[in-house]
Image (spheres, helix red, strand yellow):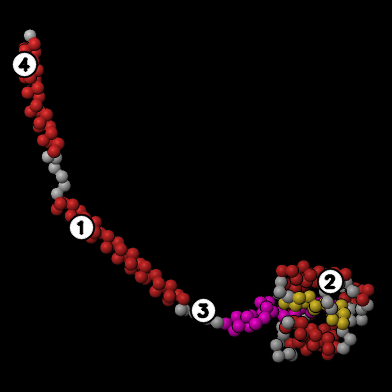
Amino acid sequence: CRQERFRAGNRQLSSALPTMAGWFRRLLHKPKPSSAESSLDAGRSASSSPSSSSSSAKSSGSSPSTSLARSVCPAPVLASDINASGSARWAKSYDVCICHSDVDLELVEELVSYLEGQPESFRCFLQLRDAAPGSAVVTELCDAVQNSHCWVMLITPGFLRDPWCKYQMHQALAEAPMANGRTIPVLKDVDRKDYPKELRNLYYIYMALKEKSFRQIRDTIVR
């Protein structure tokens, strides 16, 4: 019995050996990609990369020339830009706005004539001369303050009695922290005790001699 079982086992093993041998042969002889195919794939990838690199090189090569062309084209220089570079007053429509009462009009006209006759050709805003007919007084006063570099406050007894003068003074003080202009108080025939409290933190010009005071106002505007 033992010999019969041993013979039967040998027959099963001998019958299974060819199958296993065939499986191992197929595994060992599995086809691999040929060197020609791999070289062909490498050639295709290499041929596609130069085109992309050349296109990127063209784009990168064109951008410096474009930027260079933009950088070498200077913008036209205007006379107003040259003037503005020398003084902040050119950023405004007027160099100075004269705030005064009606009773002091004659003195103000002398001051305006003096400033406009200077080599700097100061641009003065004189309300009775430059205000647009039909416009509201409040609108004209506010526009004059906003569009002027400096504000001359001719403080006289008539100024202290005029509510419009005080209104324009307050507008100038509100504009001063946000502008390049300066408020220039000019006292005439007013005691120190009557000097407006709103202006007591500012230096003022005391008008004893007109010619000297006019020069001081001019120097303050150009400073």
Rounded to the nearest angstrom, the CA distance separating label 1 from label 2 is 85 Å
How much space separates mark 2 and mark 4, taking CA atoms? 127 Å
Magenta segment: does it hold 97?
Answer: yes
Residue 222: % across, % down: 72, 83
Which residue bears the numbered disc 3?
A: 75
Q: Is mark 2 on a helix, strand or loop?
A: loop
Q: Please give the label number shown on residue 7.
A: 4
First reached walking from the N terminus: tag 2 or tag 4: 4
Q: Which of marks 2 and 3 is nearer the N terminus?
A: 3
* Left or right relative to 17: residue 188: right
Could you tell me the amino acid type at mark 2? Asn
Which residue in the structure is indicated by mark 1?
A: 43
Q: Which amino acid does label 1 sit on?
A: Gly
- The residue segment tinted magenta is 78-102
Residue 201, numbered circle? 2
CA separation in Å, label 3 and label 1: 51 Å
Callout 2: 10 Å neighbours few (<14), some, many (20+)? few
Q: How far apart are marks 2 and 3 (CA)?
A: 44 Å
**Image check: 139 left or right of 196?**
left
Answer with left or right where residue 46 lies relative to residue 110: left
Q: Is mark 1 on a helix, strand or loop?
A: helix
Q: Nearer the viewer, mark 2 or mark 3?
A: 2
> What SS does tag 3 mark?
loop
Q: Amino acid under label 4?
A: Arg
Q: Quadrant of residue 159?
A: bottom right
